[in-house]
Amino acid sequence: MADKEELLQRLASRVRTPDVTDAMGRMHRHRCHIDDLVTPTPGRVLLGPAITMSFLPSCEKALPPEQYNFSRLFHDAIENGARGRVLVLAGNGHPGVSLGGGTKLSLVAAHSLAGVLADGRLRDFPEIANYGFAAYCSGQTAKWGGDTVTPYEANRPVVVSGVTVRPGDYVFADASGAAVIPAAQVLSVFEEADRIAQNEAAFVDRVRDETPAAE
């Protein structure tokens, strides 16, 4: 397993999200890519198996906060492991609402997760940037989101920007966007993505060699 993870990390360092998306397109028919992401951690690549947390509209009577809160749901999510995982926050139709900020996401840092992919906004970008993980979301906001949405359940399949994310699926994100890859095919997808990246680089080199030098 360690050898597989090391190989996966090496391959991931040589590819971009478009390469992974193209590789997925050759192996699967379903949508896997997520566009229009913002990050407080530019330059950091996000890669790891998903754990999930989904949110519902706030209702203190139906969803009492002593039971339905970020800390409890987070610990439910990491019950089977935390290190290297990606916390996927699904806003369920609330992309403009904060799903977390520096205080809540300190749990992500404390438990050594790889990072966060949020189908909503995040607060406290400067604070998040000081943590060691990578974070991608739909945007930044100054407003607390707890009056609008409440954490509801952990480690169930969720939908993020039209893409299904199942616990254990791999999430890859960089400056180009994000892609979600089934765990059973993650290594073969990244091997194919690496071939795509190499072929495209070779094509660019050939074009450069064929282009006449300016006189």
Image (cartoon, helix red, strand yellow):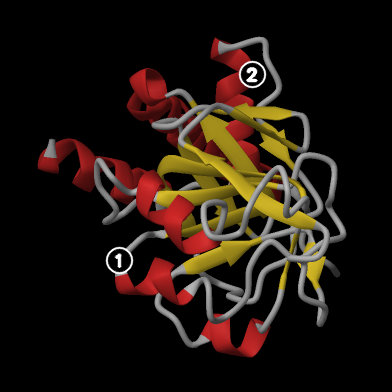
Q: Position of residue 168 (x, y in %)?
A: 39, 31
Label 2: element kind: helix
Q: Amino acid at mark 2?
A: Gly
Q: Nearer the viewer, residue 61 or 97?
A: 61
Q: Which residue is mark 2?
A: 25
Secondary structure of the residue carrying tag 1 is: loop
Q: Which mark is residue 111?
A: 1
Looking at the figure, which quarter contains the N terminus?
top left
Instruction: Name which residue type carries label 1.
Output: His
x and y percent of residue 159 in the render?
Answer: 69, 31
Q: Tally the numbered discs.
A: 2
Q: CA distance from mark 1 to mark 2?
A: 34 Å
Residue name at image x 44 percent, y 77 percent: 106
- Residue 166, given in percent of the width and then of the height, sits at 50, 27
Taking depth in this image into account, of 74 and 215 the one nearest to the observer is 74
Residue drawn at the location 20% of the way across and 47% of the way down: 6
The answer to whether residue 36 is above or below residue 51 is below
Q: From this view, report whether residue 83 is shown above or below residue 30.
A: below
Q: Residues within 10 Å of mark 2 (few under 14, many from 20)?
A: some
